[in-house]
Image (cartoon, rainbow, N blue to C red):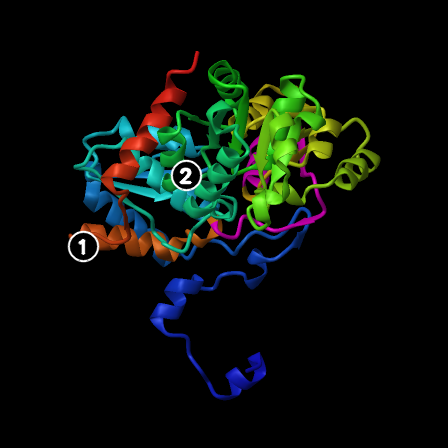
């Protein structure tokens, strides 16, 4: 049915539809936008007031976490902001909070549940807020991969290293098989540790972070890396290729960072003379190789904080964060632009919008626990083991 037909029928959206879609949300916010891009329309004043009232009613019983990639309308209610692991640790450091409302995506809420006490309850305002990268590696696929490595006679030499951006099941597999978790800021330390334990690494689920860390930071060659495709028999690799490899990379990627290209880098350098290109290590290897600076979300923020006034920066990461940083440092004369001309927001992260947050907070204020994220005890035990190995890294 077309928009015109809908208007002729005078169809009014239901309250549920408004909740799911976001009241007066900009329909362009989920597709590619031209740089600098239009952010979703400003927060509805009524929803802002309701969120504030519900949060005040809950008081110290609630602790709201906001990931850097969230919309400003959500970030304004966060008690702390950060990347996924920092937020999970912040939640664990607030044992007095009965409710942890995680404005992020599903795997982040799982990590918070793993690291917090049994008495604390982790809530994800929209259960549809997943992560395409985390979904690229399922427990069944990884178990099949381990069987392939076993048949090739190398499983005992392989140490799994899983990125924080993975499901609790994958973290549990990693812990059960003697591996560790890593973040984008400590991936090199995690790989150093892994190669002290074994001869090879199975890196899950982001191929780009694994490849960039191994080649750019640790001096390996691209030939030391092979790509395991879970959708092909034996991962699309021969036993000989697996035996020769040092890094067995899972065929996964971030849907946002994976869209940046070498053309993006070349184009921005031509448009803005003297620009500094700063990208996240989830970007493709050729993009990372062409950039001036590479680092995690926290690294990007700190680099811009330390940048001299008048400097020019093109940032290769999620658009909400880039726009927030551009506005923050504009008064200091720092020119900050998005690396690419057209790219989408992180669509799954943007599912945590103000209507969902209001619904979650008001439900909790009324004594109704909604959208709880709870990891089963066996999965939690092995996943926590992998996380504790990361925490113990030198």
Residue 129: x percent and y percent? Answer: 42, 51
Q: Considering the image in quadrants, where does the N terminus appear?
A: bottom right
Label 2 environment density (alpha carbons within 10 Å; few <14, some 14–19, many ≥20): many
Question: To which residue does mark 2 refer?
Answer: 170
Q: Judging from the image, what secondary structure is the residue with disc 2 in?
A: helix
- Relative to the observer, which residue lies in front, 199 or 167? 199
Report the mark closest to the observer, 1 or 2. Answer: 2
Q: Image check: 110 left or right of 243?
A: left
Label 1 environment density (alpha carbons within 10 Å; few <14, some 14–19, many ≥20): few
Residue 325 can be seen, yes or no:
yes
Question: To which residue does mark 1 refer?
Answer: 368
Residue 357: x percent and y percent? Answer: 34, 51
Location of residue 284 (image quadrant): top right
- Relative to the observer, which residue lies in front, 336 or 240? 240
Residue found 40% across the figure and 22% down from its top: 390
Query: Which circle's residue, 1 or 2, is located before the other in the chain?
Result: 2
């Amino acid at each position: 049915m077309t928009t015109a037909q809908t208007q002729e029928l005078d169809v009014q959206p239901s309250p549920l539809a408004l909740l799911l879609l976001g009241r007066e949300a900009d329909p362009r916010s989920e597709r590619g936008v031209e740089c600098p891009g239009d952010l979703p329309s400003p927060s509805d004043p009524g929803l802002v007031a309701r969120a504030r009232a519900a949060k005040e009613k809950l008081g110290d019983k609630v602790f709201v976490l906001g990931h850097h990639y969230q919309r400003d309308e959500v970030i304004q209610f966060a008690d702390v902001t950060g990347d996924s692991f920092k937020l999970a640790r912040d939640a664990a450091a607030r044992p007095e909070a009965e409710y942890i409302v995680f404005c992020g995506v599903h795997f982040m809420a799982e990590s918070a549940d793993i690291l917090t006490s049994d008495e604390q309850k982790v809530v994800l305002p929209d259960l549809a807020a997943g992560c395409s990268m985390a979904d690229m590696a399922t427990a069944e696929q990884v178990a099949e991969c381990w069987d392939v490595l076993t048949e090739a006679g190398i499983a005992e030499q392989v140490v799994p290293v899983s990125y924080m951006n993975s499901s609790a099941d994958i973290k549990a597999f990693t812990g059960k098989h003697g591996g560790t978790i890593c973040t984008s800021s400590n991936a090199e330390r995690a790989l150093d540790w892994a190669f002290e334990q074994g001869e090879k690494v199975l890196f899950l689920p982001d191929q780009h972070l694994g490849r960039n860390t191994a080649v750019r930071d640790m001096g390996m060659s691209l030939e030391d890396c092979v790509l395991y495709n879970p959708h092909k028999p034996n991962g699309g690799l021969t036993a000989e290729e697996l035996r020769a490899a040092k890094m067995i990379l899972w065929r996964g990627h971030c849907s946002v960072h994976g869209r940046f290209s070498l053309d993006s880098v070349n184009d921005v350098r031509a448009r803005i003379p003297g620009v500094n290109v700063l990208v996240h290590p989830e970007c493709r290897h050729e993009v990372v190789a062409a950039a001036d600076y590479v680092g995690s979300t926290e690294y990007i923020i700190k680099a811009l904080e330390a940048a001299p006034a008048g400097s020019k920066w093109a940032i290769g990461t999620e658009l909400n964060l880039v726009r927030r940083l551009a506005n923050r440092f504009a008064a200091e004369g720092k020119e900050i632009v998005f690396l690419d001309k057209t790219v989408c927001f992180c669509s799954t992260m943007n599912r945590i919008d103000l209507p969902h947050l209001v619904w979650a907070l008001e439900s909790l204020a009324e004594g109704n626990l909604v959208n709880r994220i709870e990891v089963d005890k066996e999965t939690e035990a092995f996943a926590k083991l992998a996380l504790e190995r990361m925490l113990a890294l030198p």
